[in-house]
Image (spheres, helix red, strand yellow):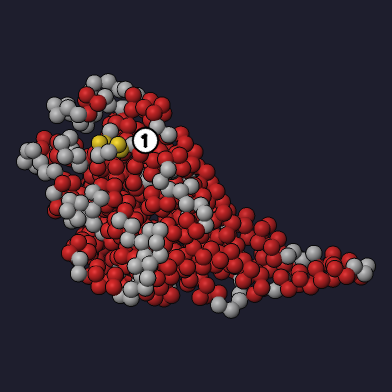
Amino acid sequence: MITGVRSRGARLRSTAFGYGNLIPFILFALFPFYFMLITSFKSNAELYSLKSVPLWIQKGVIVDHYRYLFMRTEFFTWIKNSLIISVVATSISLVISILAGYSLARLRFRGVGSFGTAVFITYLVPPTLLFLPLSQVVVWLGVADSIWALIVTYPTFLVPFSTWLLMGYFRTIPREIEECALVDGATRMQTLLRIALPMALPGIVCATLFGFTLTWNEFIYALTFVSQSSQKTAIVGVTADLIRGDIYYWGSLMAGAVLASVPVVACYVFFLDYYVSGLTAGAVKG
Amino acid sequence: MAVGGRVLQAAGVASAGRLARVHAWWEQEHVFGYGLILPAFVLIGCLVAYPFGMALYFSLSDYWVGSPGQFVGLGNYREILGNEVFRQTVANSFLFTAIALTGKTVLGVWLALLLARNLRGKRLLRGAVLLPWVIPTALSTLGWGWMFDSLYSVVNWTGIHLGLIAPPGPNWLGMPNYAMAAVIIVNIWRGLPFFAITVLAGLVSIPREYYEAAEVDGASSFGRFRYVTLPLLKPVLAVVILFSTIFTFNDFNIVYVLTRGGPVNTTHLFATYAYQIGLQGGNLGQGAAISLFMLPTLGLVVFFQLRYIRKE
């Protein structure tokens, strides 16, 4: 961070200090994933033996836990449900948020400030405050106990978040370009779709990624609004249905946890920079 | 397309004239503006504001799953306040939030300072640090549950072999204080990336000249941190801490998956207790009242948050 004329020894020492202090953090961050991964490939005999070393696989890699997951559970159905819910809920929310975000960031009309504040407050309302009444609302809407209960309710947290995120991106577009388009006879909708939208593309990619991640990872609504196994999401299926009675089958549980994380991790690896910018935009841009 | 409308009007098509008028109306800045936010506000109205009102109504009535009950005034609140478990839940929630937030703030700033150094593999390091935030919390918490297993805990195994824990080691999820510690550790683990990465963004935006000036003035590295970094980081830190307060205070996933509020209710938070009473017990009225007890604290945080953002 600080450059200056320093001796080579001092620089080396500083680098060693940096790495040395980062190692515990990296271990802390990554060890649980490593442990989940090796657990999913260990035999039960090794998992439940007090004599074995738990830190690595000693008695050979086995795929029985994965086979069990594919053959004996509804794992693929859960993954399919999660995919449908994520894609549909994110798409709907994105359309609503692009319209609202553009309006709140760009247009001048009475009350625009208070509407922005309202969106922000909604963004801060935690799902844990609403899950009880929403569990009744989905019954009245006739979508209880199906993936539609989640498709309907997920926009409640996606729209405020994406709108807030997109407002920040729309604000960075120079107003002059849009004004030129309007003067040239484009309608407002055309200006939004053809001028503002392409320029806010990074923001839209970001909102899509976060929408997908948030819906895929959502837990409390998915747990409370859906109880039949064939309609569950991957996360709830793994956490609830793989535990029979009070018995935890750690091998298959960890196999399910690893596989159900794959879609999000894949997105994350490819779009790391978008995640970083979206994370900081949500809190810092304001 | 206004031209098209006018041409049609000149040709004597009456309905086209009306279309042009509608079009001109729609092209007004305020009409267009309200039009665009309409879908969002219908959604927020129907699925956030209305349910919120319902929660208020539930909390004032004797409402059970499947049987709308009668208005009972503040009866639910009175009953809850007299409830031992609820009082325990309140204490848990504040303890949990206070410790987890302190941990995340201190470790987060420290981690951000380390990540801001000009090290090789910076991008990879940041990617690794952010990972716990991306993976579904319920699933990674499940992994932590296995790491804290009563018999085969890898935490205990490692601790014992490093000579840090006396064998056989604690039953983490089965003993009150240890269970709370476990829940807090997992919350810090999962929330640290958000702190570190956001604070890092704040650090990067501090002009380098300030540090150079401080160095010329003979400030030590701690002095630079204390008098340059910290004051300039304050706005970012304030926003991050306020955000995190809300989401820590409302945590559900970690406690539900790791301990279900146990042992003997010592890790229940508002959300998990409301879930137990409202949905598992079916007493929606009381469950709603429990979750609404979060409101004053939340309101306070939101108030500060808004004031802060307005100032910016």
Q: Residue A214 at what x, y percent from top left?
A: 44, 51
Q: Nearer the viewer, residue A211 or A251?
A: A251
Give me the residue at 42% from left, 57% from top.
Answer: A135
Q: Nearer the viewer, residue A11 or A157?
A: A157
Q: Is residue B59 left or right of residue A268?
A: left
Q: Is residue A201 left or right of residue B98?
A: right
Vertical side of B80 occupied by A247: above or below: above
Give me the residue at 22% from left, 39% from top.
Answer: B147
Give me the residue at 13% from left, 49% from top.
Answer: B175
Quarter of the figure that contains the C terminus of chain B:
bottom left
Chain ID, mark 1: A
The outermost residue toward the right is B11
Classify residue B168 by image quadrant: top left
Q: Is residue B307 left or right of residue A164?
A: left
Q: Is residue B265 visible?
A: yes
Vertical side of A54 occupied by B23: above or below: below
Q: Classify 10 Å Cα crowding around label 1: few (below 14), some (14-19), many (20 and above).
A: many
Q: Residue A44 at what x, y percent from top left?
A: 25, 26
Classify residue A281 by image quadrant: bottom left
Q: Is residue A273 visible?
A: no
Quarter of the figure that contains the N terminus of chain B:
bottom right
Query: What is the three-letter code of the residue carrying label 1?
Result: Gly
Give me the residue at 13% from left, 43% from top.
Answer: B171
Secondary structure of the residue carrying tag 1 is: helix
Q: Residue B259 at what x, y percent from top left?
A: 23, 49
